Image (tube, rainbow, N blue to C red):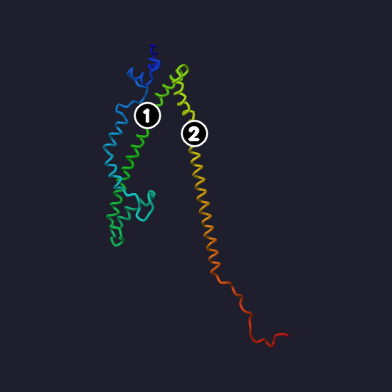
Amino acid sequence: MNTPGPHNPTTQTPDVAPTQAGSAAGESTAGNVPAVSVSAAVATFLQSVDAALKTLVAALPRDVPGGAKHPRMLQPTRLRAIPLLAEMLRRHPYLRATIPVEDIDAAMADVRATSGLSMRFALAKGAIDDATRVRQHDAWNACAEIMAVAERKAKTVADVARELAEVQDILALGPRADTAAINAEIARQDVLKAQARLAKAEKRAAAKALLAASTAAQTPPVTPPPAPTGTPDPNAPR
């Protein structure tokens, strides 16, 4: 058995992964181990709110009556004007057309409720995204230690060399491969959009040509006016 170094408990045995050796020594290679498992906390949260979220989503309107799906947020100036107009209607009921002022009040109450909920979800999302990034780095930092040991062992252990090669092939792709795939998809989408625009232009041109031909077929030919007839002017020179 090798004697572990003062700063590297992972060298306790040659064939023990760094995370395993760290656990055996009562330490962890991950730098941000939470007191409560994040995955367990997420599972508990989802179990407690899953039914409530489904009920909430079912109650939320998605479409504007007679309008498009998922409309844009209303302009802030209009939002500021709504309470003033509602109060005007309250003071002058004869201005009411088809919507009672109580419906406006109820709609704005829902706006305040959903806006507050959205802000809370946004704050939660920020914390969740931070936790995702932190734990990604924790996992990779531990794996980086594994790679450092594996690279040394790969010189003498064939199995380690073969398994490490698979990892290195993945890492060799790097972010450039992801960017290339994204750029290829963007280029493909651009081609599809260009083809769609060309098809629309050809369709419009064909429709115009058909309309012109139909109009020409229905328009009677122009007949020149007949030559003027009448009594010759006796004073006209002969």
Q: Which disc number belongs to residue 135? A: 1
- Position of the C terminus, as image quadrant, is bottom right
Give residue 181's position: percent from left, percent from top: 49, 37
Q: Which disc number belongs to residue 123? A: none
Question: Based on the displayed image, in which of its 4 quarters is residue 101 positioned?
Answer: bottom left
Nearer-the-camera pick, 81 or 168: 168
Do tag 1 and tag 2 residues touch (Cβ < 8 Å)? no
Question: Based on the displayed image, in which of its 4 quarters is residue 133 positioned?
Answer: top left
Question: In the image, 214: left or right of 28?
Answer: right
Rendered residue at 47%/35% (across/down): 178
Rendered residue at 33%/41% (across/down): 119
Disc 1 residue type (three-letter)? Arg
Nearer-the-camera pick, 150 or 89: 150
Can residue 206 be seen here? yes
Nearer-the-camera pick, 191 or 114: 191
Q: Is mark 2 on a helix, strand or loop?
A: helix
Give residue 144's position: percent from left, percent from top: 42, 23
180 vs 227: above or below: above
The residue that disc 2 covers is 177
